[in-house]
Amino acid sequence: MSTISQTLHEAPRRHPLMVAIAMGAAWLLLYLQLEPLSFALVRALPIDQGGHLAGALQFFFYDTPKVLLLLTGVVFVMGIVHTFISPERTRKLLSGRRSGVGNTMAAALGIVTPFCSCSAVPLFIGFLQAGVPLGITFSFLIAAPLVNEIALAMLAAMFGWKIALLYLSMGLLVAIAAGLLIGALRMENSLEDWVRDLQTSPAAPVTADALDWGGRFASGAEHFREIVGKVWPYIVVGVALGAAIHGYVPENLMASIMGSDSWWSVPAAVGLGVPMYTNAAGVIPIVEALLAKGASLGTALAFMMSVIALSAPEMLILRKVLKPKLIVTFASIVAIGILFVGFVFNHVL
């Protein structure tokens, strides 16, 4: 018995490719069964099958495991990818770069960094310590939660690659432009004193750890436990809210409030999103329900961007790093960028 147990424990490291293929096949099989299973669960309940509650429950039973499965797959794969890209190498890559090129590189690196706005702050501090210019660092801070691979993969799965690529291009534009503007304002004096002192301290040396594929798969599993373990409550709450909107909110009401005909809908959506705090995985089900009820795409995406990039908890954490003047400048520039994206989407699509 102990030999069998040891074999099962060591199998992922000895045969990582076979284990990955088996896990991928199981993941795909389960994903394809989610929709019929959600309808079967609702039919088994003693409720009016054509009522609001049935619609809300079907949405919840389908979207909750769907979002969690998508998140699990993306996070596991990117956990493997991140074994090739360490934070130390990232800091070394960005330090000493000129504005423009550096902002673009920092924003692009944010795509493969699955951090929420709050968890990106420690890396933001590390960049400053490594000598990365302030504006370039802000491009990363904005892009990391806004256009990371989790948001893009889930948008593509739910709304198609056209929407996902448009969101990617607009999100990168906001991150690059905001970083360039903040860098041009030369607001290094608005960093807290202890952060400015860090900029004169040596950064951690770059290490080059060699991992076999078994170790990389173990890293992917650890990545899954760390990220999914933290965000699943937000996903459940987000899907529950989306289910309530899907089942009970009249279509004409949502269209009148968040439709493209209302010029004030985009600013209102941004104002509504700022006090909230969740990540892309938690807010996308809400966006899905809003769109199904008649909300315009630009307004819904502006809401999503404001929740992810301008959350009140992020501002509180940044207050430990930045003085109020720089926080207000950062939030104002990003808010203007999000408003621009919302109006563009509403008028183009």
Image (tube, rainbow, N blue to C red):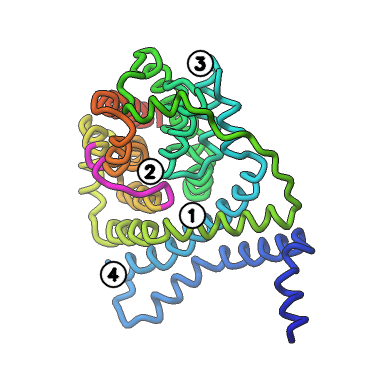
Cα distance between the residues tagged 3 and 2: 25 Å
Q: Residue at x 32, y 62 (%)?
A: 240
* Place of residue 21 in the rendered image (x, y in percent of width and height, measured from the top left): 72, 61
Please state which amino acid type lies under the numbered disc 2.
Cys
Q: Residues within 10 Å of mark 2 (few under 14, many from 20)?
A: many
Q: Residues within 10 Å of mark 3 (few under 14, many from 20)?
A: some
Say which quarter of the image contains residue 47. bottom left
**Sequence-wise, which precedes: disc 3 or disc 1?**
3
Cα distance between the residues tagged 1 and 4: 31 Å
Cα distance between the residues tagged 4 and 2: 35 Å
Please state which amino acid type lies under the numbered disc 3.
Gly
Above or below, 97 relative to 38: above
Cα distance between the residues tagged 3 and 1: 31 Å
Residue 343 in view (yes/no): no
Q: Residues within 10 Å of mark 1 (few under 14, many from 20)?
A: some
Q: Residues within 10 Å of mark 4 (few under 14, many from 20)?
A: some
**Sequence-wise, which precedes: disc 4 or disc 3?**
4
Above or below, 179 relative to 26: above
Mark 4 = which residue? 53
Please state which amino acid type lies under the numbered disc 1.
Ile
Cα distance between the residues tagged 4 and 3: 51 Å
Q: Are marks 1 and 4 in contact (CB under 8 Å)?
A: no
Q: Which of 69 and 34 is in front in this view?
A: 69
Please state which amino acid type lies under the numbered disc 4.
Leu
Q: Which residue is drawn at 53% across and 14% down?
A: 98
**Sequence-wise, which precedes: disc 1 or disc 2?**
2
Mark 2 = which residue? 118
Mark 1 = which residue? 227
* Place of residue 22 in the rendered image (x, y in percent of width and height, measured from the top left): 71, 65
Q: Which residue is drawn at 28% across and 69% down?
A: 53
User: Which quadrant, please, contains the C terminus?
Assistant: top left
